[in-house]
Image (spheres, rainbow, N blue to C red):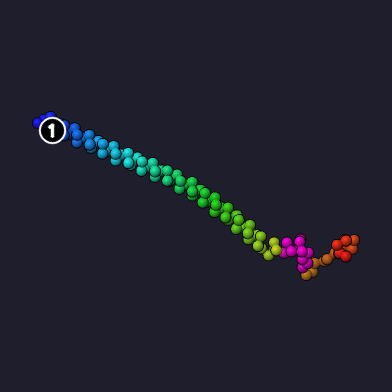
Amino acid sequence: MKIAKSKKKLIRNILIFCVACFVASSFITTFARIQEYNDQITVLEKEISKEKQTNKVLKQKKNQIHSDKNYKDIARNTLGLVNPGDKVYVNSNDNNSK
């Protein structure tokens, strides 16, 4: 009778130990995944921050390009825009003015 009780106790203890090992390994695996996901979040947040900075710089460049001053400079330098009050000099030796 004592042998049967001690075997049952041993089997019960082995089962408890196995269940505890399974639960512990599940927690360890879960915590490892959580840490991996947190690392990925950190990397992605850095990328987002970098892209936001790039977006800000590009918006500033866009605003500079589409400014009235830039349009006037382009018109003055490429199309020969003359503002009221500007003095215009014509080169009489220029072959293109014929």
Identify the residue under disc 1.
Answer: 5
Residues packed near mark 1 inside 10 Å, few (<14), some (14 to 19) or many (20 plus):
few
Q: Which residue lies at the image location 9% right of the left edge and 31% below the top edge?
A: 1
- Identify which residue, 22 or 58, lies in the foreground: 22
Question: Who's the residue at 42% across and 43% down the image?
Answer: 36
Magenta highlight range: 72-83
The amino acid type found where label 1 is placed reads Lys
Q: Position of residue 41 (x, y in %)?
A: 45, 48
Q: Residue 82's spot in the image, x, y percent?
A: 78, 67
Q: Residue at x 26, y 36 (%)?
A: 18
Residue 97 placement (x, y as % from top left) = 86, 64
The answer to which quarter of the image holds residue 35 is top left
SS assignment for the magenta stretch, majority: helix
Q: Foreground: 78 or 90?
A: 78
Q: Quadrant of the C terminus?
A: bottom right
Compared with residue 95, is residue 13 higher up or lower down, i.e. above or below? above
Residue 30 relative to residue 72: left or right? left
